[in-house]
Amino acid sequence: MIDLAGSTDPAVPGQPYRYVSANLASRDENLSGVEDFAIVQFRGLRVAVIGITNEEAPSLVFPGSFGTIEVTDSVAAANRAREAAKKQGASVFIVIVHKGVTNFDADGNPQGPLIDFAAALHGFHAIIGDHTDVQWQGVINGQLVFENRSKGLTYSRTTLTVHRGTGRLLDWTHEFVTPTAAAVTPDPAILAMLEPFRADLAAAFDRKIGVATNVFVRGGNIERRQEVAIGDLIADGTRLRYGTQLALMSDGGIRAPLPSSYTPLDPTLDRSAPPPFDLVVGDVFTVLPFGNIVVTRTVTGAQLWAALENGVSRVAADGTAADGRFPQISGFRFVYDSRDPVGSRVKSVELTDGTPILPDGTTYTLALPNFVNAGGDGYTMFADGQGVTRDLDAQVLLDYIESLGTITPTTDGRIVNLATAP
């Protein structure tokens, strides 16, 4: 949220915020109340806030959710919106964009879509990124660029000093702020209002389902570039539930570690370090919150190879960054090299017993989320109308943890990147 203290420009009636995105073709045929930019009056200046949607957004939501909207080139759209806003008297230009920093090179320089986007622009005062849960600030082409941590972990306090006549950026200050509950005095009325809801949540989510001998790590995008224990756990539970040969999920669906940030009301549960940790129902629904449904189907070796090529296509050459399409798998293993061109990175695929899976017409049984089966995260090779609908993915994981009782975070080398292998 951008708060221009002193602004006299209201939001759209009935909406708490104004919605802006300048790079959506057929936007107005599908949405209402969305503009390329908003201009607000601020201390005698007209400030344009331009919205930009990341180009891969349609693949990150359930296929078909965008209707006939097409996401167009973000740089061209930002420049067009800037010129249009300038004609309407704006002299300060701010871009909010759903792009972020993905990694840092050996010299500590940031890399990723936000950096590339900012480097292609000129004449903006501030470019505010998002999406990758990375905290960074810097100046690119004379433009202040920054990204905060996700989920409210940090926010920014920014001051721009602008020449009234020319709109030239004279100076800026920026600081990241980490909000803490200790800094807020609880409102008794709000606490009383929340009490019955918390009681209902506790009744549904505080039931103990197992014990973790250590943390199943998720975060810092580690699960988006390599095999992780929580990915193995989810994929194994899915495969074993339906007796398929293979299981695959895109790691963008994994939203928390185990144990998660869910806080049970029951004080007898062991949730604090050192391990082991009690796990509860609420942990599972925090890890898998999207309500995806497991689908089982057959898949050819050619489809599986294509899927894996898609899954590793966004991994940086040095293996340090990727995105939510990276696969977590069960029932097989594969080797790839992120230094090779996209589309020719996968080197070998085989069942866990060593039987090669070739990129041919041989069929295998596969379990996967309906989101992936419908072509989400770029897995269009699965969008062929196949699939038997099964159960909620969170319920499958819950039942699997409960059947094991005690779980230990381990990996077994089912995914190997030759670029980072010892």
Image (cartoon, helix red, strand yellow):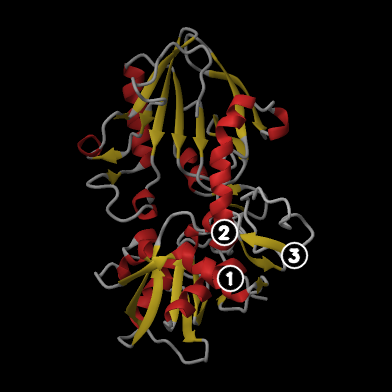
Q: Is residue 237 left or right of residue 371?
A: right
Left-right relation of 142 to 177: left
Q: Which residue is mark 1?
A: 402
Q: Quadrant of residue 408?
A: bottom right
Instruction: Tell me: 395 left or right of 139.
Output: left
Q: Which residue lies at the image location 33% right of the left edge and 34% below the top edge?
A: 22
Image quadrant occupied by the C terminus: bottom right
User: What's the residue at 64%, 61% (across, down)?
Assistant: 279
Depth-wise, is mark 2 or mark 3 nearer the camera? 2
**Residue 102, image x, y percentages:** 55, 51
Asked which secondary structure carries label 1, the reply is helix
Q: Which of the numbered marks, if any, corresponds to residue 219?
A: none
* Closer to us: 132 or 31: 31
**Among the 4 quarters of the image, the one containing residue 53:** top left
Image position of 107 with respect to 338: above or below: above
Q: Amino acid at mark 2?
A: Val
The numbered disc on residue 281 is 2
- Give the residue at mark 3: 276
Q: Are marks 1 and 2 in contact (CB under 8 Å)?
A: no
